[in-house]
Amino acid sequence: MEETVKLPKTGCESCSLRELKGYRTFSSPAEAKFIAKFKSGELNCEPGTTIAAEGSFSPHLFTVLDGWGFRYKTMEDGRRQVINFIVPGDLVGLQGAILDQMDHSVEALTKMRLCIFERDRVFSLFEKHAQLAFDITWLAAREEFMLDEHLLSVGRRTALERAAYLLAFLYERGTASGLISPKKTHLPVTQDLIADMLGLSLVHTNKTLRKLADQKLISWQDKGCNVLDQEGLCTVAEWTPPEEGEPRPFL
Amino acid sequence: MEETVKLPKTGCESCSLRELKGYRTFSSPAEAKFIAKFKSGELNCEPGTTIAAEGSFSPHLFTVLDGWGFRYKTMEDGRRQVINFIVPGDLVGLQGAILDQMDHSVEALTKMRLCIFERDRVFSLFEKHAQLAFDITWLAAREEFMLDEHLLSVGRRTALERAAYLLAFLYERGTASGLISPKKTHLPVTQDLIADMLGLSLVHTNKTLRKLADQKLISWQDKGCNVLDQEGLCTVAEWTPPEEGEPRPFL
DNA sequence: CGCCTGCTTGAACGCTATCAAAAAACGTGG
DNA sequence: CCACGTTTTTTGATAGCGTTCAAGCAGGCG
């Protein structure tokens, strides 16, 4: 089902993520060395695997190396809200590591590969590598930034706008992280999941997505979505993707 | 209108916030000294003052010393979404300082007093005081935590539940920060503002709040709300306030 | 006193939810 | 490769929650 590889700590310098366009390289050899030791293993998991569960304690913190995931919260009666999607470079479990409180679950959407860190060593990272500490804060601030946008969307956009925003957002994140490319434009999401992110019912989500498909902005196939016209989606949503600045940091 | 006091940097050790129950004291004299130098002034402002505007660049970062505020995003056609409320100890402008991007506005709800920091000196804080750097990350993680809850609420709760959740949340934050006490139970919010946080129309918000008032959970007076039965609100919302752990950090 | 802001209420409309069911796609074992 | 159960997508009909439009009221302030 899932598999934890304990020792391939090697090669953080040649981490596949470092080579990706838009991702930061190490700022010093010392930093690379530190991370290599900081890393305690790798986790490979299949679609549907729960990486962290609401309310549980996890001694780990992860950086996503490959694959899509998402995090969500549930209410006792089963209502579910997807909070955000997760792509390579994202930190998983930061709230748990910093606040000692994990009030959302994280699940793999595709096969995922994650880098494992020990949360009780996080403080040592802050002590020894200010730049890395800053990077963690950067990641936290950026997550906050995305949640701000999601809140605006769920709170104030119509169903059609919301759906368009979300797909444009996912497309944007996908391309920025190399999960989406001209030859692989497939978003691995079910309509059920989209519904729970949009705060809409499944039925209405379906009808809304159909409209977007009729307008040739997306197409739906193979348990997922293809974005055909990113700009069109942005127009419908009245949204503009954040412009890429510096290469983004990650641990 | 607003008034920037440039020099009373003194007395961070005896900062009114440090004395508040639930707020952390300095962990070392060196830290206190650093913060005293890090602080570049104080800002006093009146209700309605815009402390930071969407899209603008601000060279400052603030810690709230006193008063209520809120942050929000707007769309071009005027739709507004309140993202979160701000109480003493909260950091204002973190996204701007870390990401060089400020995509929300911040406004004072009551008179506010803020501590001013220079954003271009933030990195030096990370270099010299790991504990303070960690604290900033703690604050960011906690904001993220709150936004997670807001998203669940706006996305999946009914109007009545949402309203109950929000008021319970505000009451909780208010008491934790000393803005609310047995003798001062007044939340300085208009229904207009509540509506824009709940993602509901003003009219429906009004009717919903009326129901909560009819159930004697709240009362509305003096341009604001009094929480009469916090537990009752929590029950309606199916929400439980986070339990206080360690004293919370702040800059 | 009159204006402005904020709260309240009623009525009609409509977006979205819910219910119900079927079609399509997928996975799996024979 | 086919049959069959399961998951996912689709569609139609009905109900209802929340919006919009339209007033009216109350309190604060110049």
Image: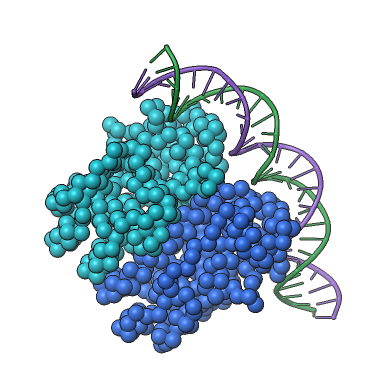
Chain colours: A blue, B cyan, C green, D purple
Q: Which quadrant of the figure has residue A25?
A: bottom left
The reply to whether residue A155 is visible in this rendering is no
User: C2 or B168, which lies in front?
Assistant: C2
Q: Which quadrant of the figure has residue D30?
A: top left
Q: Is residue B165 left or right of residue A38?
A: right
Count all numbered tags in the image, as a single digit.
Answer: 0
The reply to whether residue B212 is visible in this rendering is yes
Q: Is residue A51 left or right of residue B95?
A: right
Residue A45 screen position, x and y as percent: 54, 76
Residue A96 screen position, x and y as percent: 39, 63
Q: Is residue A198 left or right of residue A62?
A: right
User: A63 or A137, which lies in front?
Assistant: A137
In the image, what residue occupies the spot 39% across and 75% down?
A251
Q: Quadrant of the N terminus of chain B?
A: top left
User: B239 or A66, which lies in front?
Assistant: A66
In the image, what residue occupies the spot 53% across and 44% down?
B79
In the image, what residue occupies the spot 37% across and 27% down?
B222
Q: Quadrant of the C terminus of chain B?
A: bottom left
Above or below residue A209? Residue C25 is below
Residue D17 screen position, x and y as percent: 61, 38
Q: Which quadrant of the figure has residue A123?
A: bottom left
Residue B65 screen position, x and y as percent: 25, 46
Above or below residue B166? Residue A231 is below
In the image, what residue occupies the spot 50% across and 29% down?
B210
Above or below residue A88? Residue B125 is above
